[in-house]
Image (spheres, rainbow, N blue to C red):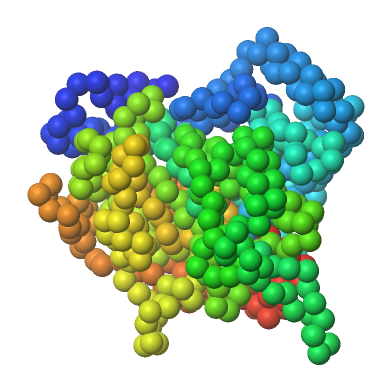
Amino acid sequence: MNNEGDLLQEDSRDDGNETEASRINKLRRTRKKVTKPHISSTEMGEMDISNSKDNTSNNTQIPTAPQLSSRMKHIKQEMTKNHLQFVRFEATDLHGVSRSKSIPAHFFQEKVIHGVFMPRGYLELIPNPKDNEVDHIRATCFNSDIVLMPELSTFRVLPWAERTARVICDTFTVTGEPLLTSPRYIAKRQLDQLQDCGFSLLSAFIYDFCIFGVPEIINSKTISFPVSTLLNNHDQPFIQELVDGLYHTGANVESFSSSTRPGQMEICFLSEFGISSADNAFTLRTGVKEVAKKHNYITSFFIETGFCNSGILSHSLWDVGGKRNLFCSSSGTEQLTITGKKWLAGLLKHSAALSCLMAPAVSCRKRYSKESKDQKESVPTTWGYNDNSCAFNIKCHGERGARIENKLGSATANPYLVLAATVAAGLDGLQSSDGTLAAPDDSTELYQSKPSEIPLKLEDALVALEEDQCLRHALGETFIHYFVAMKKYELENEETDAERNKFLEYFI
């Protein structure tokens, strides 16, 4: 790691406010100096593929040849032991939905070396974009192929699919460049920036989703009813198979419960460092659908009228070694540290643009104004301590110390984009010397030069995203162009897409 970005090496010493402020000042001076060369996905993140995970890894270590050989040997043993026939090469599209190609298991080693080809349009989902609307990447175009390169640390046997394993992939152009619209690539790049500045992120997603029975035909209309029995007994066989299956894919569920409405469930993942939290959420989005079908259920993260399926990112900032939570000075504290307040200030400052990525559909933005009867264009961004009604809820209880719940998100948001945008906004808060500032330590307030507002209309949120220079730079101009073009197309075809999403279960 670059020594200039190693800001927290002296954390074993007293971390008083003066030291913390000094560290933040140093971050401002050094963050822009940090760059990293591109590493191909076959060289990235090949950690031990057991369920135990490196505390601080962002999956960007370069393994040695013997390590790669050892891991491939372990994978071959797993394939033989489980009599695997197929391996899915999975990648996320812009919506966070898994797009995959399955290959016969005996071709796996060859595909690890050369990758798997897939039409680029599978991932970007923009129908016939005009040349002046998007920034086409060099040596390729919308109708070209892209290459799925597997990250071997994510190889898992799928408990809910017969004799099948999966591996999560990074996406590249045929010329070897990373696909700049890839949400996972964008998230890993932001985590690299965080690590280069001497920090690591501990995070976990909390998801609501709805479970419906098999559709019934009533008066010539197809209707799906919520599975109301889940409110009382959780339908143990279904939930147990899902939770146990997630564990065997490396995604540890900390708790599950029935939520506020019949058929609505909540799953909380165990916090992990680096990209793993988004990988876990990505795994759930596919796994819950496949397990539900085995039990004659249909599951959906999609929000219909009257439902609010949330996707919360609970996170805290730690030193680069993952030893100390920088949001608190001791367990049980009622105050965020200066570092925590600055991070929160960044989230507040960019909340309008963040909301575009975290509530990316018309229906999931309705909850922002659910308590207001007045017709407004925006609502204030709220934050508070242990207040679940706030957009940013600071929780100081628990064995791992203070954490911030980013509650702007809906369950339809892409978890990689939620993670990336949260890190980008938080880092900007750490390095900013103007705009939204933390208050003195004896106060729980934040001083804001301009109060934060969340647009209620998706169209206004898209404008906020386009005008947010920090997020444009962090996520990349190419991604912003594609994302905005995709959302504008969806707005023009809102009614048609709503029917497609409901009946074809696109948003699982």
Rendered location of residue 240, percent (x, y): 65, 47
Count of numbered labels shown in the rendering:
0
Q: Residue at x 66, y 68 (%)?
A: 227
Question: Is residue 460 or residue 106 the one in the foreground?
Answer: 106
120 sits left or right of 370 in the view: right
Q: Quadrant of residue 214?
A: bottom right
Rendered location of residue 442, percent (x, y): 10, 49
| Quadrant where the N terminus is found in the figure | top left
221 sits left or right of 412 in the view: right
Figure check: 28 above or below 109: below
Q: Could you tell me if residue 366 is visible in this image?
A: yes
Q: Residue at x 53, y 56 (%)?
A: 257
| Quadrant where the C terminus is found in the figure | bottom right
Residue furthest front in the image: 233
Q: Residue at x 20, y 63 (%)?
A: 449
262 sits left or right of 70 in the view: left
Residue furthest bottom in the image: 219
Rendered location of residue 387, percent (x, y): 31, 61
Q: Residue at x 79, y 61 (%)?
A: 296
Residue furthest top in the image: 66
Question: Is residue 72 or residue 485 the one in the foreground?
Answer: 72
